[in-house]
């Protein structure tokens, strides 16, 4: 993807002084329209004032495009991203809004027609499917896949613009939404094949960074005059199909394994013409869905393939992983190609897919229609915490690993989290809908995972409590053999406290939403055992947070991971919070003394 330079404003059209390039920004969680900055580069900031309220336009124009950016909203602020200067995705401080509208963050703003009857001038706005907005002063993320309107040779519109997909903080909030015309307050009321990206500057402060985009051309890569040869047999290496005597063959619309007439052990070769619409670097992907890493086939060749364009081998698939990629610099025009492969694994319907992307064209299939197996539709099984907290035992994926002793806790406020019961550690927290259990409860497949449905914050997964030899001792990755889970108990509102023993203390870990779902409060209580001594007890610590960067804010609050979320320390239990270096980052710790009895550390996660 291309990156928008933010070293200066040279790549934007001239604008008023409300726009500037800075190096750091911050916004107070509780102060309206507050956005302060420090000199430097890499962040685009809008701070409007009287007479300085221009919208900002890129110097380049776009048609079809994928756009990624990060943004920060101060409390109560309002802005917008206009694709082609015409179609707005709303930027808004929508933190904690229970039922978002088109005017909230991620909404596709309404159209406006002043000639319509009163109360009906605004129409066709699209709210986000879920509100996953983060708190003022935190960085958020958009990924937008936009398709421009289409026009015939005479300039007549033949297809509407479309938001193919909009992802807000990792959650899909729009898919395939057609836009019949420019939204309200657009810079242009007509529609064209291209237009500049516009950032609204006449409403409220906003900061934007890491603007990346990929523009697409409208014409696809295609194949023609495709023919195939097929041979049945238990091949263990890619055969030379021209030398086989027992083959079948014919014409095909594209790559289509079904033309072989068999499904278990066979080889095929496709030949034809590859039509490339633009000069450029093209990436190819060849996928065999029967290559699954099954240990029974570890030493046995279950398939292989090769893509040749012209006289060059572009891609070789050894059958060790499902998808293999290759690339070639190609000129616009027609190129002869061949694709050869074999399958040597019985018992599974094959699916062979060849994809291409590059030269300004989006990812597309070169397969014949219907030849790539569609995922079998299974209605989603979801659990909602609509009336009271819900607790779901199961497996989750965390930091690339499958955690098998976990419990997900959902709450009607829309704040949810997952605990690793094997470590006494919080793995993740999220807002939005609760959890999908399809993979866990339907057919009991290999992964059997529960999947959070909202915007997820991932944590380190390390224990919350540890006994350290000294203040410089590294935090342990696990609880060790002295840890014993004692189950959990529910309070009167249904919120769990997780109970465990370690060494000579007992621990209660109690979590519950607060402030209408804007906070997740955690209370970690340590109680000494009968054999405790003051010397040993003084070496216990509670780990409140970890990240690449931890910055202290006013009022015993901290910004974690460069303003990805906040921690507000409500009660240190008598200890003094310490920020120290750890594993190339930082961690926030609180020392505990149990000489006078039990101690509770209390803090709130805010995002």
Image: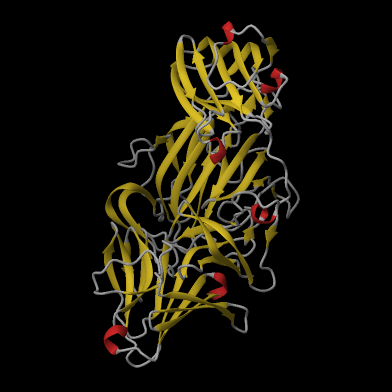
Q: Nearer the viewer, residue 233 or 51?
A: 233
51 is higher (above) or lower (below) than 565: above
Note whether residue 28 is visible.
yes
- Residue 431 position by quadrant: bottom right
Residue 534 location (% of width, % of height): 29, 89
Farthest right residue in view: 117
Total marks placed: 0
380 vs 479, nearest the viewer: 479
Question: Observer-nearest residue: 228 or 52?
Answer: 228
**Which x, y percent locates residue 421?**
51, 69
User: Residue 468, image x and y in percent?
Assistant: 29, 74
Q: Which residue is found at the position 41% from the left and 55% from the top? A: 50
Left or right? Give the position of 486 relative to 212: right
Q: Nearer the viewer, residue 564 or 271?
A: 271
Q: Which image quadrant: the N terminus?
A: top left
Q: Is residue 222 left or right of residue 17?
A: right
Residue 493: quadrant of the picture: bottom right
Q: Is residue 127 left or right of residue 187?
A: right
Work out whether residue 359 can be spotted: no
């Amino acid at each position: 993807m291309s990156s928008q330079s933010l070293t200066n404003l040279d790549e934007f059209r001239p604008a008023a002084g409300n726009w500037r390039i800075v190096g750091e920004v911050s916004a107070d969680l509780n102060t309206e329209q507050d956005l302060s900055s420090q000199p430097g580069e890499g962040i685009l900031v809008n701070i409007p004032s009287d007479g300085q309220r221009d919208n900002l336009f890129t110097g380049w124009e776009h048609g079809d495009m994928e756009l990624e950016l990060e943004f920060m909203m101060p409390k109560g602020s309002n802005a917008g991203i206009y694709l082609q200067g015409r179609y707005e995705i709303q930027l808004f401080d929508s933190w904690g809004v229970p039922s978002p509208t088109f005017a909230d963050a991620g909404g596709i703003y309404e159209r406006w027609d002043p000639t319509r009857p009163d109360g009906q001038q605004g129409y066709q706005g699209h709210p986000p499917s879920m509100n996953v907005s983060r708190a003022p002063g935190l960085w958020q993320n958009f990924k937008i896949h936009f398709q421009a309107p289409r026009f015939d040779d005479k300039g007549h519109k033949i297809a509407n613009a479309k938001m193919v997909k909009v992802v807000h903080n990792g959650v899909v909030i729009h898919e395939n939404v057609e836009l019949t015309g420019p939204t309200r307050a657009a810079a242009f009321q007509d529609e064209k094949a291209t237009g500049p990206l516009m950032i609204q500057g006449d409403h409220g402060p906003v900061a934007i960074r890491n603007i990346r985009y990929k523009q697409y051309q409208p014409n696809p890569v295609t194949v023609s005059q495709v023919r195939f040869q097929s041979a049945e047999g238990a091949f263990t290496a890619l055969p030379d199909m021209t030398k086989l005597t027992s083959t079948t063959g014919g014409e095909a619309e594209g790559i289509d394994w079904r033309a072989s007439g068999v499904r278990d052990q066979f080889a095929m070769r496709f030949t034809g013409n590859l039509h490339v619409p633009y000069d450029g670097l093209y990436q190819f992907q060849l996928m065999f869905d029967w290559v699954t890493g099954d240990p029974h086939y570890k030493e046995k060749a279950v398939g292989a393939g090769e893509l040749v364009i012209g006289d060059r081998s572009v891609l070789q698939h050894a059958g060790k992983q499902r998808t293999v990629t290759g690339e070639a610099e190609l000129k616009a025009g027609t190129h002869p190609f061949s694709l050869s492969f074999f399958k040597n694994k019985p018992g599974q319907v094959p699916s062979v897919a060849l994809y291409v992307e590059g030269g300004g064209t989006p990812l597309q299939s070169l397969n014949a229609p219907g030849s790539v197996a569609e995922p079998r539709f299974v209605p989603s099984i979801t659990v909602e915490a609509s009336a009271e907290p819900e607790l779901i035992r199961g497996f989750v994926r965390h930091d690339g690993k499958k955690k098998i002793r976990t419990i997900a806790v959902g709450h009607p406020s829309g704040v949810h989290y997952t605990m690793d019961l094997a470590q006494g550690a919080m793995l993740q927290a999220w807002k939005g809908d609760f959890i999908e259990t399809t993979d866990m409860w339907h057919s009991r497949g290999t992964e059997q995972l529960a999947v959070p449905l909202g915007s997820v914050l991932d944590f380190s997964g390390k224990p919350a409590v540890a006994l350290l030899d000294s203040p410089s001792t590294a935090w342990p990755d696990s609880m060790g053999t002295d840890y014993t889970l004692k189950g959990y108990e529910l309070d009167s509102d249904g919120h769990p406290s997780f109970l465990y023993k370690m060494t000579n203390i007992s621990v209660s870990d109690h979590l519950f939403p607060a402030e209408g779902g804007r906070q997740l409060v955690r209370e970690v209580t340590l109680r000494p055992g009968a054999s405790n001594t003051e010397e040993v007890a003084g070496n216990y610590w509670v780990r409140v947070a970890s990240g690449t960067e931890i910055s202290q804010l006013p009022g015993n609050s901290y910004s974690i991971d460069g303003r990805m979320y906040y921690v507000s320390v409500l009660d240190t239990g008598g200890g003094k919070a310490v920020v120290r270096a750890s594993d190339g980052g930082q961690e926030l710790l609180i020392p505990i003394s149990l000489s006078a009895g039990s101690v509770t550390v209390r803090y709130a996660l805010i995002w």
